[in-house]
Image: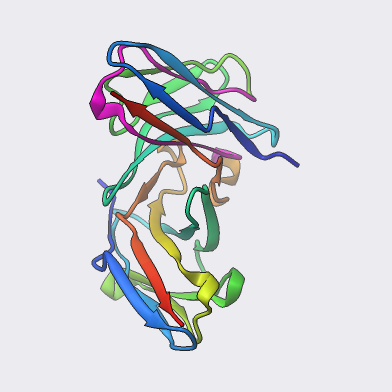
Amino acid sequence: NAGVTQTPKFRILKIGQSMTLQCTQDMNHNYMYWYRQDPGMGLKLIYYSVGAGITDKGEVPNGYNVSRSTTEDFPLRLELAAPSQTSVYFCASGPGQGASNSPLHFGNGTRLTVT
Amino acid sequence: AQSVTQPDIHITVSEGASLELRCNYSYGATPYLFWYVQSPGQGLQLLLKYFSGDTLVQGIKGFEAEFKRSQSSFNLRKPSVHWSDAAEYFCAVGGGTGGGNKLTFGTGTQLKVEL
């Protein structure tokens, strides 16, 4: 019963490098989300998806891209890493509109440092 | 736009003492309200949720929360705190229909428990 799995757990990037944060869920959830968490700021929504092939911007999408080719996977791409992207990234999933009162399930996070 | 305010950044209580964490929300319709807990290095775990009905909801680990529409509040309480309750607590608000069921989080309250 894996739930939401994020890889890697930790990563250090140099400015200008690119990387993909992986997220996969095995609960057949339609909705998936990427949040970033910064100290004292709570969680901010980066992007979300309501189903395979559908993505939309959240509150802080600049500098990121996503894709949703399958129900299970929702990778987050950083093309040109910047120090402002140093953060902890959380992926979450939920069953979706028909069961919109169900809570989100979170992964354990990816801690990213950009230097 | 929906928003959540957690006015207390840090709270320290003695083990065995009662606890109340404050949460105020802003939302244009009937809110869906959640409390999550985050232990160090972990993802967020759902403590409890409110959608409708009884305004006093019970959650895991002995926590409860009361929805007060007139005060736009959803405060979290526990009668007797255990040392293992030390963690960061997040209040969140979301809509039940449309908008991708996105959650908006507060900035969190860090709970320290003194033995």
> Measuring 54% from the left and 63% from the top, which residue is drawn there?
B47
Q: Residue furthest right?
A: A1
User: x and y percent of residue A25 in the render?
Assistant: 64, 32
Q: Is residue A23 above or below residue B26?
A: above
Provide residue A59's location: percent of width, then percent of height.
29, 34
* Residue B31 showing in the rendered view: no
Q: Is residue B76 above or below residue B36?
A: below
Location of the C terminus of chain A by quadrant is top left
The region drawn magenta spans: A72-97
Q: Assign the N terminus of chain A to one quadrant of the image.
A: top right
Q: How many marks?
A: 0
Quarter of the image for residue A35 reads top left
Q: Quadrant of residue B99?
A: top left
Residue at image position (47%, 48%) is: B96
Q: Which residue is depicted at the point 38% across and 12% down?
A: A18
- Relative vertical location of residue B31 with respect to residue A51 in this rendering, above or below: below
Residue A29 coordinates in the image, percent (x, y): 63, 34
- From the viewer's perspective, tell me whether residue B80 is left or right of residue A113: right
Magenta stretch: includes residue A96: yes
